[in-house]
Amino acid sequence: MFRVADGEEVVDEIATYQQSRYLSAMESAWRLLAYPVHDHAPTVEQLRVHLGSEDQPLRFAAGDRLDEVVQRGVDTKLTSFFKLCAEDEFAATLLYHQVPRFFTWQQPTRSWRRRRRGAPHPEGDGEDLLTPPHPV
């Protein structure tokens, strides 16, 4: 279905989408049987890399003095990863890009926390950390 109109007419894209949506027999069957139509795994976590304190982001507030801001610093995902490796024996065996599989980033505390659900903690079960969690 289509229509030719002059350039002055305002097009309601939402109504057009709803009126012209087509579900094939296969898609309808998958939806009726509650099969997943798409998948969102794995989640993407941006892991920035920086060079020591010279390249760290700093946050200023009104009235802050420069020396106080530099002294205060901010923990980044990378510096928190180093702290985590010093505290957690299992985390010390991981590479930086493997951390989001077993830990989640907590923005308010700016630290890594062990996952409570999702990827299992492989300590002691002999799982190869470089093997993808799902068959490809």
Image (cartoon, rainbow, N blue to C red):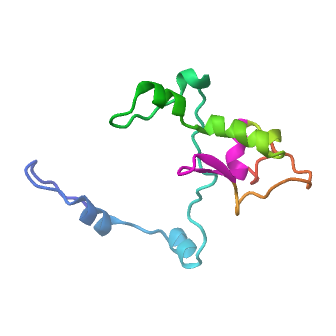
User: Per the image, is 103 magenta?
Assistant: yes
Q: Which x, y percent locates residue 100?
A: 67, 47
The residue that appears at 52% across and 34% down in the rendered structure is 72
Which region of the structure is painted magenta?
Answer: 96-113
Q: Which x, y percent locates residue 67?
A: 47, 25
The residue that appears at 76% across and 52% down in the rendered structure is 133
Q: In this view, does 70 lie above or below 87?
A: above
Using the rendered view, name the quadrant where residue 17 is placed: bottom left
Position of the N terminus by quadrant? bottom left
**Residue sticking out furthest to the bottom:** 32
Q: Who is closer to the viewer here, 99 or 64? A: 64
Apparent side of residue 114 relative to residue 26 in the rendered image (left or right): right
Q: In this view, does 23 lie above or below 84?
A: below
Q: Which x, y percent locates residue 9?
A: 10, 54
Q: Is residue 22 above or below residue 71?
A: below
Q: Who is closer to the viewer here, 36 or 67? A: 67
Count of number-bearing discs: 0
The residue that appears at 34% across and 34% down in the rendered structure is 63
Apparent side of residue 4 relative to residue 20 in the rendered image (left or right): left
Q: Who is closer to the viewer here, 115 or 55? A: 55
The residue that appears at 61% across and 71% down in the rendered structure is 35
Using the rendered view, name the quadrant where residue 15 is placed: bottom left
User: Per the image, is 88 magenta?
Assistant: no
Q: Which x, y percent locates residue 101?
A: 70, 49
Apparent side of residue 98 relative to residue 34 in the rendered image (left or right): right
